[in-house]
Amino acid sequence: MSQLLRLSIGIPVHNGENYLAELLDCLLTQTFRDFEIVISDNASTDRTAEICLDYANRDERIRYSRNERNIGAARNFNRVFELARAPYFKWTAHDDLYHPTYLERCFETIEQDPEVVLCHSGVYFIADDGSPLRFDVERLCFVDNQGGTLKVSSLESALEALEPIHLAEGRTAVSRFCDVVDRRTWCTYIFGVVRRDVLSSTALHESYFGSDKVLLAELALSGRFGQVEDKLFAKRCHTGMTIHLSPQERAQWIDPDAQRVSTPVGMFMGYIKAVLRTRSLNLPGRIVCLAAIIRKTIRSEQWGWMLCRGRQAVFRTFLERTGDKICNGK
């Protein structure tokens, strides 16, 4: 093992035999070499374990751990971070790819500026077979070589697909937090290189869909994000992506023990807790950030659902309290 272990790469994986070997080959050919790879196998039932053990036997920088049962994506993402040992860390999905200079360029950027807590590069999108996807501006969708399409959810998502978005680069915690909250993205920044000490001060990934966006917002409260202009990160689009899952399937993916469908309330409350937990904001700053959360919620398509749930909760509380008074003879 290199004596200059400066970066830990965490790979949380469940049944990743289709793409895992390609990712590992990609990482092992990086121009930046002072890293370890920590794999947490979430009780896979395919050839994932076999692939991991084969690569671990060939390269001492790879450490493999296997969960006895599927603990869910959120806890497994946190698990690889717990196992990491270096002062810098990055997550990577088992199905994405990187240009050989990705780690070198990102590490150079974050190490040279102590105010930068996370660094990522520009993004391009690839199909299941690794071929680049063409973006159709008029239809706001990706088109593969066979004519298949993948729609994007918003204009902001389309812009990120076309050029680097320079997220959370402001000098104040308030501006950075609001930038992350206001600008809907593919959330690829979650796979950037980040300072371990800063990441350990957050709530990490929590068991609701969208917690990665909340985690990015909480990181932005601690410092600026860096951006490598070149597109060095390849996001793979395929049928197994979470955007193709139903709400119930997403809830099970995040947490197999979940008793209910994952809702937007979790993400809403996550943002609020991040603002209340941080020490980087004064009272006026907290108020501005809370206002940004409320404004984003009202403008989103999730507002109607949350408002409906809120009314139900108020009505249920009223009935419970009224019932108690009747039972007590009041």
Image: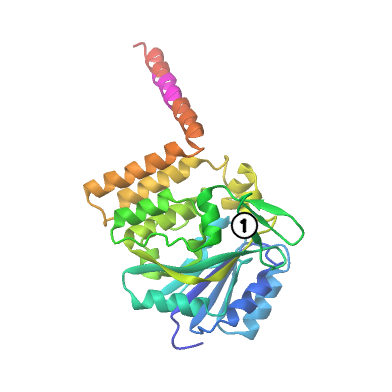
Q: Nearer the viewer, residue 95 or 159?
A: 159
Magenta-highlighted residues: 314-321
Most frequent secondary structure within the magenta stretch: helix
Q: Could one spot residue 87 in this view of the protein?
A: no
- Residue for badge 1: 70
Query: In the image, what residue occupies the spot 32% across and 47% down?
Result: 289
Q: Is residue 306 above or below residue 244?
A: above
The residue under the point 42% across, 60% down is: 167
Q: Is residue 317 magenta?
A: yes
Name the amino acid, label 1: Asn
Based on the displayed image, in which of its 4 quarters is residue 53 positioned? Answer: bottom right
Element type at mark 1 = loop
Check disc 1: other Cα within 10 Å, few if <14, some if 14-19, many if 20+: some
- Give the image quarter of residue 231: bottom right
**Front-most of 25 and 144?**
144
Q: Is residue 138 magenta?
A: no
Q: Nearer the viewer, residue 317 or 24?
A: 24
The residue positioned 62% from the left and 52% from the top of the image is 242
Question: Going by the image, does 112 lie left or right of 191?
Answer: left
Q: Percent x, y for residue 41?
A: 62, 66
Front residue of 183/210: it is 183
Give how far across and how far down residue 197 sits, in percent: 36, 68
Q: Residue at x 60, y 48 (%)?
A: 250
Q: Quadrant of the C terminus?
A: top left
Q: Left or right: 7 with respect to 127?
A: left
Indicate the position of residue 58 as horizontal and vertical percent values.
64, 85
Q: How many marks?
A: 1
Q: Is residue 219 visible?
A: yes
